[in-house]
Image (cartoon, grey):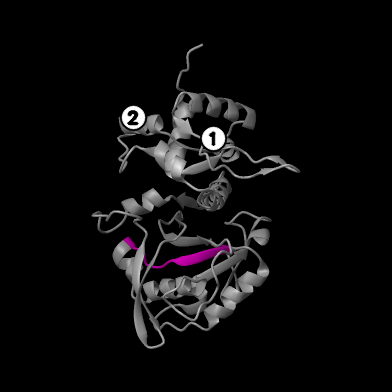
Amino acid sequence: MPFRLTEDDTTIVRMLARHRFLRSTHIAVLIGRSIDRTNDRLRKLFHAGYVDRPRAQLDYYPSAGSAPMVYALADRGARLLIERDGTGFANVEWSRKNRQAGRPFIEHQLEIIDFYVSLQVAMNGREDVRLIHPDELIAEFPDQRIPDGNPFKLNVQVSSKGSLHDVGIVPDLVFGLRFPDGSKRCFMVEIDRGTMPVTRSDIRQTSFERKMRAYLSAQASKAHERQFGWKAFRVLTVTTDDHRLSSMRQALRNIHVPRSSGASLFLFASREDLSSADPISFLWRDGTDCAVALT
């Protein structure tokens, strides 16, 4: 029987264009279908050239079975969205990009998507708050002449030991919450995998402390107002464990950036603690260890 593209199939292709990588389990949750039915459609979409399976898949764990298959947008899927939606892509060589993606990069992207999908699931059935996706936030930027690269990149000057240093920072994810009165809250997200030191003596080297300094400097200089049109924002950090979280909070207490919110700009959670609730109902802890809800 010849393959026929369904509306659900097109939705899957759109999801992959938005998220870059998705597990089959993510897709099943987002489209509200059983995993068996989802896997069947994904297999057909793959063989028809609409979706891709990156070669650098997650490891196989003999004691736990195979991890769910990871999917990405393929060239034919990109062409479909250009024809149907008028989607603009810098290039449509997605299959080549998927081949070049290494396993650490894919694993980090999937951890970001785990968080993003949990946000979307948390919104199901809620009328008191709505998720604002990154592309919606971009559409509200005061200046629509958006430069190449990541539109949420912040370029700031960070002060350290009497010198100024140019630092660029790109959050892992950006989203907003819209409330019935029309107000919104904006959040930048850092999914920390514990691969960089929390602190370093040289500000020119990457560290999580440098990221925090950059966010505080961005807030103090009102870069978020000029670039994004936001009145305020907060930074959510999900990290590996309580020990690393404590080290981050201690480093934050030693940072002093005039005209910034200081420690209250950041909200923290360990991966284990966050797994017990969705990001919206979860009580985050700020840099002073006060409990804070996103809504």
Q: Which residue is mark 2?
A: 84
Q: Looking at the image, is 286 positioned above or below residue 118? A: below
**Where 129 sits versus 13, above or below?**
below
Asked whether residue 235 is drawn in magenta, I would say yes
Instruction: Report the disc number at residue 294.
Output: none
Residue 138 sits inside the magenta stretch: no
Name the residue: 36% across, 61% down: 153
Image quadrant in which you'd find residue 85: top left
In this view, 233 is above or below 132: below
Say few, some or many: other residues with alpha carbon within 10 Å of mark 2 (under 14 / 14 to 19 / 20 or more): few
Q: Quadrant of residue 237?
A: bottom right
> Relative to 289, is 3 on the left or the right?
left
Q: Where 272 sits versus 95, above or below?
A: below
Nearest the viewer among 176 and 201 is 201
| N-terminal label among 2 and 1 | 1
The x, y position of residue 243, in whole percent, is 66, 71
Number of numbered discs present? 2
Q: Residue at x 50, y 75 (%)?
A: 209
Magenta region: 228-238
Amino acid at circle 2: Arg
Q: Residue at x 51, y 75 (%)?
A: 264
Pointer 1 residue: 31
Taking depth in this image into account, of 194 and 1 the one nearest to the observer is 194
* Residue in view at x 45 percent, y 73 percent: 205
